Image (spheres, grey):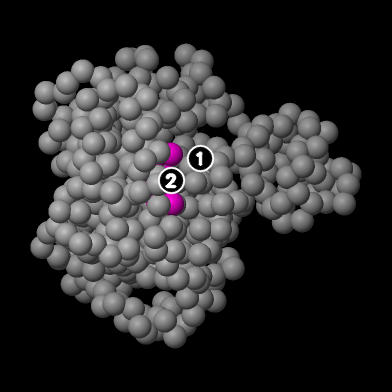
């Protein structure tokens, strides 16, 4: 059974194979729609897949062509296929669409797979991801729950000569897992994903052999309910563990200031955690005053990243209204204006591998909530030029004081993998937004406008590979 990651190379190869082929005139949308309806009624019909392949080719739809090409190759290999085998073909077809970001098509074919084999756990798992991306959270949760009821261990075998087997501890429920796909070679590393929150302790002894463990439960808030379970696993584990739970626990947002308070030229805004909503607005005001935090304040729900649910409040009345609506644990952080002299906001990201810093990106935005995807980086060449300078020589861009602070922060975090998002103050200090393990690293399109980032991402992946080798040899 293939997973998304196992199929990535196959799907990419299939798409690339068709990319250079001459493509006939566009097929009509009506033709594709009729074939889609026919396949919905008979997803096992090889003839319909062949006709859809021709239609996708005529429509210049390289992803659709690759998906149905893969399905036809599988049917040819299987010959007379059982229902379970056809379910796998549908699953693999869906996965090609999922890899290429075609979620609606992926959802359709995952549903076909599960219609033929409701016990195909990985189809439930991947369907949950696609549904979540479409905002269908309740249905996604149902499929995720079903996936982990059926199966807690998902093995993705290395595509080439296997060098090591990495056990990835993750939480099946909720968020908070560190995305490390870009750091592990598909060719040489076999991944064993273990939904430890659904598994009992007896299952720990039944895991496939592995050489190294990566604790991917990187959000400390997500890790709290799993703390006894993770501690038991680590205590009985005979293999090296990267990002052990005790290292993750230190990275709560409201503990960052204390963790880094003695690092020179570093400024961490005050932060408090609210677990239970105060009884009234006056109690909220007293709590904020006791923490010596002043407005404006940032409010964010726990276990959120990338600005999800993040709000800026200038008054107590505004904050209280949002707290009442949220009615869930959250963090309140003092907001500090970090505009540069040119009026733009800059957010730098450094990745730490084995406590050493590597530049990842610089986003420059006209808005205080800085996200790379919404910062108009592609529309303003000077921004990409500045990012290139940062990636090429981050210490020169940051200056000596900030660079020394960044190095020391890596030591204080004491994570095998993590990172920091930050800005520079007008006096050259490091203004810390967050510093923890839940940092996304991903490669860009090889020929895309952000391809300049890839050599630096490769250096991060190479450092992660060296660290794995060293830990396994100890």
Residue under pointer 2: 107
Residue 108 magenta-highlighted: yes
Q: Is residue 1 above or below residue 200?
A: above
Q: Is residue 468 left or right of residue 94?
A: left
Q: Is residue 68 above or below residue 380?
A: below
| Residue 218 at least partly seen | no
Check disc 2: other Cα within 10 Å, few if <14, some if 14-19, many if 20+: many
Check disc 1: other Cα within 10 Å, few if <14, some if 14-19, many if 20+: few
Residue at (32%, 15%) from the top-left corner? 381
Q: Label 1 to label 2, Cα distance in Å? A: 10 Å
Q: Where is residue 57 drawn, in percent x and y?
A: 21, 29
The residue closer to the viewer here, 167 or 99, is: 99
Which is the main secondary structure of the residues drawn in magenta?
A: helix
In the picture, the disc for residue 361 is none
Label 1: which secondary element:
loop
Q: Where is residue 201 drawn, in percent x and y?
A: 47, 82
Residue 193 magenta-highlighted: no
Picture quarter with the C terminus: bottom left
The residues colored magenta run 104-111
Q: Is residue 463 left or right of residue 90?
A: left
Q: Is residue 328 left or right of residue 369?
A: right
Label 2: which secondary element:
helix
| Residue 190 at least partly seen | yes
In the picture, the disc for residue 134 is 1
């Amino acid at each position: 059974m293939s997973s998304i990651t196992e199929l990535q190379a196959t799907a990419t190869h299939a798409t690339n194979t068709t990319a250079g082929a001459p493509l006939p005139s566009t097929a009509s949308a009506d033709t594709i729609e009729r074939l889609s309806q026919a396949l919905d009624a008979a997803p096992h019909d090889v003839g319909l897949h062949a006709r859809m392949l021709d239609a996708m080719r005529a429509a210049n739809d390289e992803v659709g062509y690759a998906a149905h090409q893969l399905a036809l190759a599988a049917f040819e290999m299987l010959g007379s296929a059982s229902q379970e085998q056809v379910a796998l073909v549908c699953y693999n077809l869906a996965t090609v669409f999922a890899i290429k970001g075609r979620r609606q098509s992926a959802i359709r074919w995952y549903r076909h797979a599960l219609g033929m084999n409701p016990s195909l756990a990985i189809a439930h798992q991947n369907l949950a991801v696609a549904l979540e991306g479409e905002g269908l959270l309740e249905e996604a949760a149902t499929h995720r729950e079903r996936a982990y009821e059926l199966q807690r261990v998902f093995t993705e075998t290395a595509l080439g000569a296997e060098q090591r087997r990495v056990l990835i501890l993750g939480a099946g429920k909720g968020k908070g897992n560190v995305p490390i796909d870009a750091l592990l070679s598909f060719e040489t590393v076999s991944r064993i994903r273990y939904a430890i929150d659904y598994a009992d302790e007896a299952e720990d002894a039944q895991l496939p052999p592995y050489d190294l463990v990566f604790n991917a439960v990187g959000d400390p808030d997500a890790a709290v309910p799993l703390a006894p379970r993770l501690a038991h696993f680590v205590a009985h584990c005979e293999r090296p563990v990267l990002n052990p739970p005790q290292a993750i626990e230190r990275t709560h947002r409201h503990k960052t200031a204390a963790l880094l308070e003695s690092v020179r030229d570093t400024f961490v805004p005050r932060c408090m955690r609210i677990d239970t909503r105060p009884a009234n607005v006056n109690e909220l005001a007293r709590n904020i005053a006791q923490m010596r935090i002043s407005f404006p304040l940032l409010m964010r729900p726990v276990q959120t990243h990338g600005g999800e649910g993040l709000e800026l409040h200038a008054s107590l009345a505004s904050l209280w209204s949002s707290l009442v609506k949220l009615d869930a644990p959250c963090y309140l952080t003092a907001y500090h204006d970090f505009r540069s002299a040119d009026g733009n906001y800059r957010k730098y990201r450094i990745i730490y591998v084995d406590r050493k810093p590597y530049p990842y990106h610089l986003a420059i935005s006209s808005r205080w909530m800085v996200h790379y995807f919404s910062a108009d980086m592609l529309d303003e060449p000077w921004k990409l030029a500045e990012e290139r300078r940062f990636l090429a020589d981050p210490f020169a861009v940051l200056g000596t004081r900030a660079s020394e602070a960044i190095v020391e922060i890596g030591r204080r975090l004491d994570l095998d993998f993590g990172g920091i998002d930050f800005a520079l103050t007008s006096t050259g200090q490091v203004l810390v937004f967050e510093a923890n393990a839940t940092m996304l690293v991903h490669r860009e399109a090889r020929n895309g406008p952000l391809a300049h980032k890839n050599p630096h991402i490769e250096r991060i992946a190479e450092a992660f590979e060296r660290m794995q080798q060293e830990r396994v040899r100890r």
